[in-house]
Image (cartoon, rainbow, N blue to C red):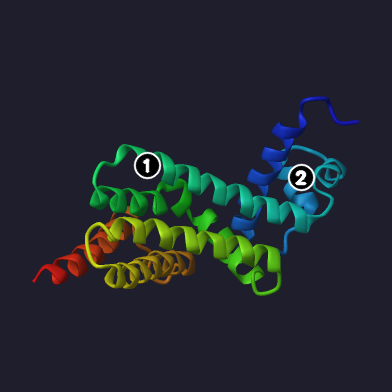
């Protein structure tokens, strides 16, 4: 019988373990037993809290996207100007916990799963829309709305592309270099509108 009050702690441990195990494997072909072992609980307890591996995976996506959202909100609070806010968003996208190899491997596995799972796809679409919306909201203060949308699409594509390159290991790039490339993209496009 699960201990009273332990459910939130164990659910968090299972979600974090799922991300690590998926990242280590580079795919979703992990078992509930592997995840439970990483979390230090029994497979029966993992099933008790989530019902199935699929439900645990969906919760893992949801929790990690919520953490990313919370990090963006916190970063935006400290930024004063629209340009500083754009930089804050970029920094959060490439911060250490988001750009770690196992995290990237897990996200690539979730993107592959989104081709089969409508619920996973829905969460990833929410992420993409949120990123676009945050970028556009701040770009509109710096350039015309039509240009803001176009530049936001390019910046989001650059962020996602850098994740894919990092995940493939074909052309590893540091956090600092990823931030610099994305910042350069924004600066070049914003400067071109001034001329």
Quarter holding the C terminus is: bottom left
Instruction: Count residues near mark 2 (Cα–Cα under 10 Å), then give few for <14, some for 14-19, many for 20+.
Output: many
Give the mark count: 2
Residue drawn at point x = 32 percent, y = 60 percent = 178
Residue farthest front in this picture: 145
Quarter holding the N terminus is: top right
- In the rendering, at what x and y percent does residue 6 appear? 76, 28
Measure the C-alpha gap from mark 2 to mark 1: 33 Å
Residue drawn at point x = 18 percent, y = 68 percent = 188
- Per the image, the residue denoted by label 2 is 36
- Per the image, the residue denoted by label 1 is 75
Marks 2 and 1, the one that precedes in the sequence: 2
- In the rendering, at what x and y percent does residue 18 appear? 67, 50
Instruction: Count residues near mark 1 (Cα–Cα under 10 Å), then give few for <14, some for 14-19, many for 20+.
Output: some
Q: Secondary structure at mark 1?
A: helix
Nearest to the eye among marks 2 and 1: give it: 1
- In the rendered image, the vertical position of residue 170 relative to residue 173, given as above or below: below
Q: Secondary structure at mark 2?
A: helix
Residue farthest top in this picture: 4
Residue farthest right in this picture: 1
């Amino acid at each position: 019988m699960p201990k009273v009050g332990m459910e939130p702690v164990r659910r968090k441990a299972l979600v974090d373990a799922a991300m690590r195990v998926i990242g280590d494997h580079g795919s979703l072909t992990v078992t509930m037993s592997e995840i439970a072992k990483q979390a230090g609980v029994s497979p029966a307890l993992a099933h008790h809290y989530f019902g199935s591996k699929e439900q645990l995976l969906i919760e893992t996506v949801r929790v990690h996207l919520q953490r990313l959202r919370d990090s963006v909100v916190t970063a935006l609070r400290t930024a004063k100007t629209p340009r500083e806010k754009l930089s804050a968003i970029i920094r959060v996208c490439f911060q250490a916990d988001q750009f770690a190899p196992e995290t990237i491997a897990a996200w690539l596995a979730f993107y592959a799963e989104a081709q089969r799972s409508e619920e996973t796809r829905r969460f990833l679409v929410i992420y993409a829309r949120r990123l676009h919306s945050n970028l556009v909201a701040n770009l509109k203060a710096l350039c015309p709305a039509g240009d803001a949308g176009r530049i936001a699409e390019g910046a989001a594509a650059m962020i996602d592309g850098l994740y894919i390159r990092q995940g493939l290991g074909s052309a590893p790039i540091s956090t600092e270099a990823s931030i610099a490339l994305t910042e350069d993209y924004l600066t070049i496009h914003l400067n071109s509108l001034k001329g």
